[in-house]
Image: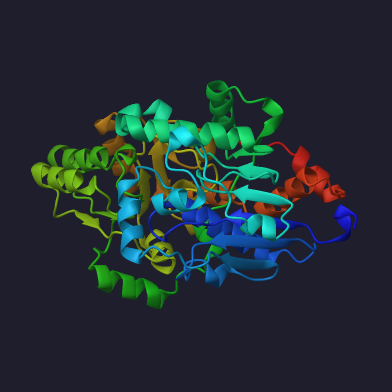
Amino acid sequence: MRADARPLCIALDAHLVSGEPGGVEQVIIGLAHGFSALADGDEQYYFLTNAGDQSWLEPHMGGACRMVQDRPSPEPAGWKRIARQVVPFAAPLWRRLRYGSVGPRLGLPFSDGTAESLDADVVHFPQQTGFRTEIPSVYHPHDLQHLHLAEFFTAEQIAVREATYRAMCEQAAMVTMTSMWGRRDLIEHYGLPGDKVVVIQLAPAIGAYAPASPAVMRAVTQRYHLPGRFIFYPAQTWPHKNHLGLLEALALLRARDGLEVPLVCSGRLNEHYAKIAKRATELGVQDLVHFLGFVEPEELRALYSMATAVVIPSMFEAFGGFGPLSEAFLAGTPAACSNVTSLPDEAGDAALLFDPTDVSAIADATRCLWTDADLRNALVKRGTANVSRFTWDRTARIFRAHYRRIAGRVLCDEDRALIAAPPAF
C-alpha cells in the first residue's frame, strides 16, 4: 500500500501527571483542542498517556483525536509518586526503569512499542522528555533556561537536561521553538542546522477553554476570599519566576507611595514556596498576598477576567504567544512584563516593560497599571490586536503541514503557505 493511501497517523507523547508540569500540560491541551477541530483532513492523532485518570485531557478529545493509555504498571501507585519526587527532572523514574534506561548516562528510555504498534508516521514530543524511536519525530525543548540561569539548578538537573535535550534534538527530524529568540538561542548553544529548527508559535493556553461566566467569577471570589481589586501572576513558584521581586515591589509601593496593591498568584506551590512565604512575612506584605496553588482552567480564566492587571516579573520565558502575557491579552486584561528573552518581542507596544532585577522598575510599572485607567484601556486595545495573530486552529494547521512534509506526503497550497510564512516574532 502506498504511504499516502492511508490516513496520516500522528502519535503525541502526553505522558504526564496533571498539575505538575505547568505550561507543558497546557501545550498538550491546546494541541488537542486545535487538532480536534480540524475537519478538512484525514489525519489521525493519538495522544499517548499514562494509565489511570486522564480527566485533564479527556474534555479536549474530539474529531480525529484519541487517547491511548499505557497498560497498568505493576508498580504500586505509591512507588510512582515517590519516584517522581526523587527524579530531578520531569521523566518519571518508573518509566525509565520500565523502558530500559536508568539515567542520563545511559541515554533516552526506549519506546514501549505503542507508537510503533499504531504504525505512526510521526511522533510528536511536546514536552522536554521523550523516548527513543526510529519513527521520524518532532521535538519541543521549549527553552534552555538551565544554561542561562544555572544557579537555579543542581548539577544533576543540568546534566539530565543536557543529556535529554541533546539526544532528543539529535533524534528529531524537526525541532520547534516558539520564538525567533528561542530559535537563535538553541542554534547558538547546540549547533543545530538552521533548517532543522522551526519557529511555530502557540496560542494562549486559555484559548482552549470557554470564557468564565459571571456566576463562575462570583464563585471563585467566594472560594478564595479574593479582594475586590488585585493584580494577578499565574506561575509555579520556581525561582526564575521571580515572585520575590514582585513581593519586594509591593513592599516598596506601600512604603514609598502609601499604595496597597493586593496580589493573587496561581500555580502549583512547589518546594520553593516556603522561601517566598517567609519573605512575604519579613517584608510585611503577607496581608496583601494570596497564593491559591493549582487552579482549574475555568477558575484561571475567571482570575484573568477579574484582575485589574497582570504583572509578569519572570527572569526567563520562552513560550511565544502562549504564556501569561498572551493569556492576559486574550482575556482583555492590561499587562506589564520583564524585558528579557522573548517577552519584549511578544509584547510589542501592548504591555509595559521593566527590568526584572530592578525592584523600583517593577513597582513603577505596577503603580502605573493600578492607578491609570486610560493606560489600562489603551493597553487592552493593543493587546487584543496583538493576540489575534495566534489561534490554536492556525497552530494545529502549521503542525499538520509539517507532519505531512516529514512523512513525505503531498502538500496542499495551504500547507506550503503555512510552512513558508515567517513567524510573528
Q: Nearer the viewer, residue 6 or 74?
A: 74
310 left or right of 229 in image: right
The quarter of the image holding the N terminus is bottom right
Q: Residue at x 20, y 38 (%)?
A: 248
Q: Nearer the viewer, residue 2 or 345?
A: 2
The quarter of the image holding the C terminus is top right
Q: Above or below — where is 87 with respect to 338?
A: below
- Count of marks, rendered view: 0
Give x and y (percent) for residue 197: 65, 33
Give x and y (percent) for residue 85: 31, 51
Identity of the residue furthest to the bottom in this view: 215
225 left or right of 389 in image: left
Q: Above or below — where is 334 with respect to 169?
A: below
Whether residue 174 can be seen here: yes
Give x and y (percent) for residue 175: 63, 37
> Looking at the image, what colour scheme do you see?
rainbow
Give x and y (percent) for residue 22: 41, 52
137 left or right of 106 in image: right
Q: Quadrant of residue 18?
A: bottom left
Q: Nearer the viewer, residue 423 or 23?
A: 23
Whether residue 259 can be seen here: no
284 left or right of 371 in image: left
Q: Residue at x 25, y 56 (%)?
A: 291
Q: Residue at x 25, y 33 (%)?
A: 359
